[in-house]
Amino acid sequence: MTDLTDISSALAAQAIELPSWAFGNSGTRFKVFGSPGTPRDPFEKISDAAQVNTYTGLAPSVALHIPWDLVDSFADLRKHAEDNGVTLGTINSNTFQDDDYKLGSVTHSDPKIRQKAIDHHFACIDVMNETGSRDLKIWLADGTNYPGQDDIRARQDRLADSLAKIYARIGADQRLVLEYKFFEPAFYHTDVPDWGTSYAHTVALGDRAFVCLDTGHHAPGTNIEFIVAQLLRLGKLGSFDFNSRFYADDDLIVGAADPFQLFRIIFEVIRGGGLNNPEVAFMLDQCHNIEKKIPGQIRSVLNVQEMTARALLVDRNALAAAQEAGDVLGANGILMDAFYTDVRPALAEWRESRGLDGDPMTAYALSGYQEKIEADRVGGTQAGWGA
Ligand code: AOS
Ligand code: ZN
Ligand code: ZN
């Protein structure tokens, strides 16, 4: 069996933040399928997220989305999280579900609408102060659908100005993390389409502004691990939104579509000093449209752990020697040896040595929790993506 001794402490330190919205119903523009047992409020989302941590030991915090997770008392929600062994993490803003934002939010030409979007971020910062959250994550739906629709350069200036106002409001221990995406819901251009644009804005903002890399937000064929390497070099990789995609921003289970890509990304994270570095937050940004949500999240964090273990097993000294010697196939072979190592039996044993069940998927299935929430949570309105 693979020996994990040398990588055990790195595995033990791994922490992956779960998105509260992964536990609500979601779907496509064709249909949202309801699932029995779906949480009816943010408290139940936190309870479900805590299950993932109970069985994996990998998911100690939960990201919230405002306004989807608005509650009367964030102090109560924070206590509920802590009672369940998790903390409240990143606060995600939302400027994409309001009619006022049809032509843009923080980039809008109308100063009143820009101010409304800025004020929403101020409200998110107020929430962060109550939840104890460090990161404000901003993903913008801003963009245009047709060439000439708006002045794309003026929009950059308005974006910079709005972000500066938001950044000025975050506390000394807080961070602003700016996510990029090259399409959708705008299709001609988006205002933060790529890592370079996010980097340019975060550099202008200052030391507490970072880039968020969502693995589903790139054109097919993009070498994402190169972007990871570059952002780590520049000290600006603040967080990941992990998911996987076959075609667009599919938000499927991380590592499902392309485990090798996940391995390559995590290898560059390790190479760049980003693994278990608090500066680089590992988060999931996924939806579970047809599968059960809690097992979907358990599978996700295990996929990240498995590829982390494989990437940690790369013999980096041998790799460096092969690279230096110009041994093209030898170097490639060293990387592939680690990728093809089946770490699952060793990880099961490693979990057991740490008081966890070796097989978290089965342990959860046998726990009775799923049957209980399906029986208990009848009536009321199921939370969904956007509710
Ligand atoms: C949207 O495509 C982005 O990935 C966002 O990070 C996120 O999925 C959305 O804001 C829901 O929270
Ligand atoms: Zn995302
Ligand atoms: Zn996305």
Image (tube, rainbow, N blue to C red):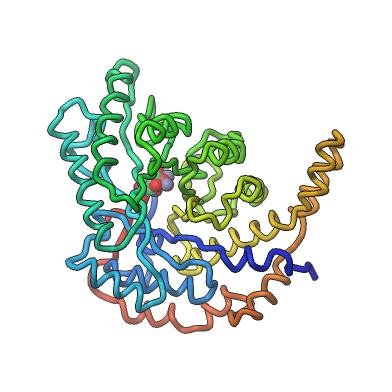
- Left or right of 347? Residue 165 is left
Whether 270 is drawn above or below 80: the answer is above
Tell me where residue 270 appears, x and y as whole percent.
Answer: 63, 51
Which residue is located at x 32 percent, y 26 percent?
144
Which quarter shows the C terminus? bottom left
Residue closest to the far top: 148
Whether 256 is drawn above or below 121: the answer is below
Tell me where residue 363 appears, x and y as whole percent.
Answer: 56, 80
- Left or right of 111? Residue 161 is right
Residue closest to the far left: 112
Which residue is located at x 52 percent, y 78 percent?
365
- Left or right of 74? Residue 347 is right
**Residue 324 visible, this angle:** yes
Which quarter shows the N terminus? bottom right
Count of all numbered marks drawn on residues in the image: 0
Whether 367 is drawn above or below 140: the answer is below
Whether 277 is drawn above or below 328: the answer is below
Relative depth, front residue between 40 and 107: 107
**Residue 149 visible, this angle:** no
Task: Place residue 90 in its image quadrant.
Answer: bottom left
Tell me where residue 287 appears, x and y as whole percent.
Answer: 43, 56
Relative depth, front residue between 98 and 156: 156
Which residue is located at x 39 percent, y 35 percent?
202
Which residue is located at x 64 percent, y 67 percent?
9
